[in-house]
Image (cartoon, coloured by chain):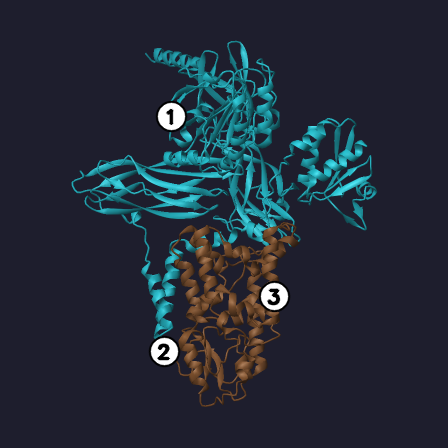
Chain colours: A cyan, B brown
Amino acid sequence: MKRSFVIFLLALGVALSSSAQEIRLTPVDPQAVGDWAKPALPFRLHPTLDRDVDYQGPALPMRLWGDLSLGSARYALVLGVSKTGAPGLWLDQNRDDAITGDELLSGERGDGYYLWQVELTAEVDGESYTYPLGLLWPEGRGYIYLIGGAPRIGTINSDGQGHTLVLVDGDINGVFGTEGDFYAVDVDADGTIYGDADGHEHFAIDEAFTLGERSFRLAQVSPAGSWVRLEQTEYVPPKLPLTPGHPAPDFTFTTLRDGRRLSLSDFQGKVVLLDFWATWCEPCMAELPNVKEIYKKYHDRGFEIIGISLDTNESALRSELQKQGITWPQYYDGKGWDNQIAALYRVFAIPATFLLDREGIIRYRDLRGEELADKVAELLAEPEEAPPPSKPPSVTAPPESILELTLPSEVGLMPGEETEVSVQVENTSPYLAEEITLRLAELPEGVTAEPKTIANLPAFGQRSVTLTIHVPEGTPQGNYPAKLVLTYHYCIGESCFQMSDEAELTLAVGKEPTAASRPWNPWWLLVLLGVGVALAWLVLGKGASALGIALMLVAGAAVGVGVYLGQARQAQLIGAVLCTSCVGIEEGRPEVPQVSAATREALAQLSRPVKLVVFHTPWCHSCPFAIAMAQEFARLSPNIDVELVDAEKNLDRAEAAGVYRSGRLIVPAIFAPATGQVIFGTRDLEARLLDLVLKCQK
Amino acid sequence: MPKVSKRRLHLFRRGSQSLGLLLGILGFTGIGMTHLIFPGLHCYACPLAVTVCPIGLMQNLIINGTVPFYWMGIVALYGLVLGRGFCGWFCPFGTLNDLLSFRKVRFLRALSPLKFLILLGTAVAAWRFGDTMFCKLCPVGGLEASLPYLGLGIAELNTPFWVHMGTLGGTLLGMVLISRFWCRYLCPMGALLSLLSRVSLFGLRLKADRCTGCGVCASACPMGLKPYQEINSTDCIKCGECVTACKEGALSIGFYLPGREGRVPVRTSGLASRLNRVFARK
């Protein structure tokens, strides 16, 4: 009996193992697979640390703490700026709860940021492994970026072919297989993995992928990332590639204006721009005049636009279309970010555009400005057969939630009464969240609650919102599940994201409202203070003395209430965040120079080689712009050769070029050896640089 | 309170002003940002700051929609204990005003309520624009944050920086031309403290029987007030310059119950104030 049971278990084990394939994974350098395997997450620093860690490093005028978790391993870190202005990062690498001076990490300075690289140990379920981590501090900020992901690589053998699989710790918490992690599979086995968030070979940790006729999902992931087990699952259609050179997925839609049924395939033979936009997206609206201009100019020659609106407010969209005089077809389904065509095209950020040629092949993505006009003209001028694709896909990131909700899991409600529920909304990111709406959904019949809107919530800001729930008389007692829906949008640079999150709560009808659902708010203390201030202008003599003492008691009570509500800590946090835009610190955004059509034309006509030497220094904030402009010139004309010279390290060359004079370096400077001429600064750089280049031709 | 010698009072005041300055830059010891609110205008973005600026915090609380128990309680306590005495005895920017006080002039008293408008404007702008608009203009921020960050090589010579330099330059010029220029007309923190200054424990006392009405106290007052007519006015920063100037010993300074004889405060603006001055002339 016993033996047969063992045999049965073994047979079951064999049967189970045959359906699950284990892939061994080994660490891989992210550079070897692509930048997508190196996620970056903002990580907030605080003036103090919640646990007891002793800082024994040098005295610092400015110091912020962080507490980093990689599995069960916790690392305290201190970011400080010394009196000389040099920043340093100390990390408790030996985890002895003491940060000593020799735990200073060596870092490097970039344009507007500092970057430190370190190898830490992550501990998961008693297993430990090495975790390479980058820590990037945008100068002057109260947060850093963690750059990690510790990618793991392995091979899936399917139908006699090897497909590379890369697993990434997307949420940088040291544990693989958690929400926020992702993986990528080279499904077409072409040696390149399109693992960007909108790539067709990128998969969320619980998403299935398809190899040939079979689909698989990750049945089990080793928390330390050393293996994954694949399990065959129900067939899912493979993700279509959206990179230039691939056909654009077809779709059918009803136009918003006149209700016509159209398909993308109906536009075969025309150059088509798929424009994903929304009226709330400022960069989209800024680009609109240019799009209108191009449409006007080329529509008669076979150019068409299909607008895919991610708006959720139809009347706002209709009035904007009318106001702007937009006549091209628009698709609108009111689902915002869940827009069906946006989902088909894996659009995670707007503005997003796909420019299709006459054959319906995606040729360019995310073009704007003059470049869009140029490419439309180029595609219209092309013969029917399309040449091979020319531009790699742009890198976008999937939108991440930046708001966190704190709400009671259960709310007591009495029939015939209104109950207030306090919900805390916290912005956990350095970005501004806008048009935040909180709405209770899936309420039991008859129960109502007004949605609440917050215009915006600044970086790391908190806001308490009170929702009023009305329960009519006669509502049966019992527990009803409901949802709190949070919608908002935010922008990072030129990309905007519309978000929608949900949180669950239980409505306990018939149960007395609990203290948790009624925030303690003795506002009358502040009213008393206000009345006291008014009386202070009227009362004299002994009354003033009594008033003064009474007000002291009220003020003391208000301080006590504030401390109890955590407002002292809030004050400390506010004090620790620097208003960089106030004091003249601006985030170093790489500026991409836009070169005018006239300059492009002039550069295209260059007949002789031109050498340009760009002198720069690490501390020069305008140098990146000068470098980018020179490189853009070189990109537009093969006759231009650009050499970058660090002026501090090459003082002799700088002196010979006239960039180093009387002990002073003047950068950015662009030197043309052919004429001996040098230009400084960035003002009107395009015109001056063109002049410099043209003089070299004479 | 016994008559304090001029030298001793000066010494006390400079000592407490130094203490204010020290608390402002205590960050050099390695202490990070604390929960404390500074009792004066002092930029929390200053690299050495360990305390929170009350006006910066006020704007952030408005932006975040917080019912400000902690902030209001602390500011009220400051107002009730020293009132605008903090301006005269503690605030580092007030100390800078003092150091540049070359001309103790009576000048445009009618502009004094401007600081209340600035306080109101600061609050409304924070609510309306969702940003710390006052901080972008604050000369204290220019002095304590923009310049140090420029020195540290972090700030840039960009528009926000030059705006700060403009307001700082204008304020410094004002200070040189008119004693306590910033405290008189513009400081929103001074406006906040002055709301409770009339019932604060710290203040001046006038012994009417000793006062000859000679006006020496008025010429000594850096705020351009007439202490013998308007003792403990809401504009009074309780610096004690008048106390040491008075040869008759009619004025004294210290901690008294606000209702005590000789502490009767007088309005400095509006109809009541004007009437008071008219009657005083008679």
Q: Which residue is mark 2?
A: A540
Closest to the camera, between mark 2 and mark 3, is 3
The image shows residue B202 at horizontal and vertical percentages of 45, 75
Q: Report whether A645 appears left or right of A204.
A: right
The vertical placement of A622 against A228, above or below, is below
The image shows residue B32 at horizontal and vertical percentages of 54, 54
Q: Secondary structure at mark 2?
A: loop
Disc ID at residue A258: 1
Which amino acid type is shown beneath numbered disc 3?
Leu
Which amino acid type is shown beneath numbered disc 2?
Leu
Image quadrant where residue B17 sits: bottom right
The one of A592 and A115 positioned closer to us in this rendering: A592
Task: In the displayed orientation, state which residue is furthest to the left.
Answer: A474
Q: Residue at x 45, y 11 (%)?
A: A213
Q: Report whether A280 appears left or right of A613.
A: left
The image shows residue A313 at horizontal and vertical percentages of 38, 35
- Does the image show residue B4? no
